[in-house]
Amino acid sequence: MAAQIQTLFNEAVRLERTGDIESAIQNYKTIIGLDPHYHLAFQNLGVLYAKQGNHKEAIPHFTNAFKLSPNVKNSYNLAVSLFKIEDYEKSISFLKQTLTYEKKFLSAHLLLAQAYQKLGNDDKTEIYLKNILKMEPNHKSAIGGLAMFYYERNRFPESLKMIERYLVLYPGNAQLKIIQSEILAKQGNYKASANLLVDMVKKEEGFTNFNQVLQSAWQEEDAVAKESMERIQTKAKKKLKEFQTKLELSKEDPEQFSPPDAQEALDLSLLYLFNGNPEKAMQYLVFAQKMKENTGTEGSSAN
């Protein structure tokens, strides 16, 4: 029996590698029928279903694998699938279990930050992102996640510090540069803010292919930052819609309308950049610069 099961298991693994997933699944199910305590068959079945995006089907197999062999891999796999079906509380429970096996498992810390963010627990989100940086100071996702976490909560000095750190280590993120520019403006450093945007639209590939750059700015592992950016972009779209409605009500020409001051022009420029319209953004940025040059007052205290 043991030899037969091993042969079936080896064949299932081979079928996986050649891409014959359905046959591999059947082999694993046959193994389970012969030996319902063969945890590797449950584990691999769960992985196959998870890769197909079928996490509801994966969970019972990961659960069985964990019961038969409680270890870091089975615990984490189960936590991930629970997270994917939005059962965040259970996911957190298994992620914490994962850390009892391997305290410095960075992926578990990162997923805990994501899960707590989903639940709106700011304190725990920040704790787990910081935990990652204690173990790996240059961790891309943790730095980006904290940058956006602080920004959304108006903790601008902390956000700016994280953004600068991120861009030194991983240059080229157009969305973070937009956030950086906005924070500088909010802090009164109008000149630095405007110069940063001008430099970006002149030098970045993003000015000619901005939509593509914004869409590809965050990778899958940067989920904490990506989710924050998606919320910000949604708010930006709402603000732009409100702005356009006001233009219609005031019977102004939207193409020719000029905001009343340089700061509002800069804000509009940032909103258009967030929504992938660099041409319109540049119109308002140029206007903002002209306003400053003409008045010599906007942001002068921070020069």
Image (cartoon, helix red, strand yellow):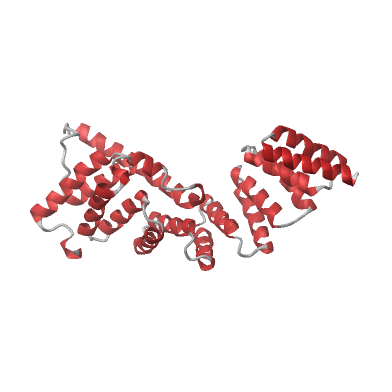
Left or right: 256 as drawn, with respect to 123: left
Quadrant of the rendered structure where residue 196 is? bottom left
Q: Look at 12% across and 58% down and name the residue there.
A: 297
Q: Look at 30% across and 48% down and name the residue there.
A: 204
Question: For this rendering, which residue is in front, 21 or 222?
Answer: 21
Question: For this rendering, which residue is in front, 219 or 268?
Answer: 219
Q: Is residue 140 above or below residue 258?
A: below
**Residue 244, position in %: x, y?**
25, 35
| The residue positioned farthest toward the left in the image shown | 294
**Which quadrant of the rendered structure holds the C terminus?**
bottom left
Total numbered badges shown on the rendered structure: 0
| Residue 86 seen anywhere in this rendered image of the structure | no
**Residue 126, position in %: x, y?**
49, 61
Question: For this rendering, which residue is in front, 207 or 154?
Answer: 207
Q: Is residue 163 above or below residue 203?
A: below
Left or right: 259 as drawn, with respect to 221: left
Q: Is residue 55 above or below residue 98?
A: above
Left or right: 86 as drawn, with respect to 157: right
**Residue 168, position in %: x, y?**
37, 61
Q: Look at 44% across and 56% down and name the residue there.
A: 144
**Which quadrant of the rendered structure holds the N terminus?**
top right
Q: Look at 69% across and 35% down and name the residue there.
A: 21
| The residue positioned farthest toward the right in the image shown | 1
Question: For this rendering, which residue is in front, 170 or 244?
Answer: 170
| The residue positioned farthest toward the bottom in the image shown | 134
| Residue 113 seen anywhere in this rendered image of the structure | yes
**Residue 51, position in %: x, y?**
63, 40
Quadrant of the rendered structure where residue 280 is? top left
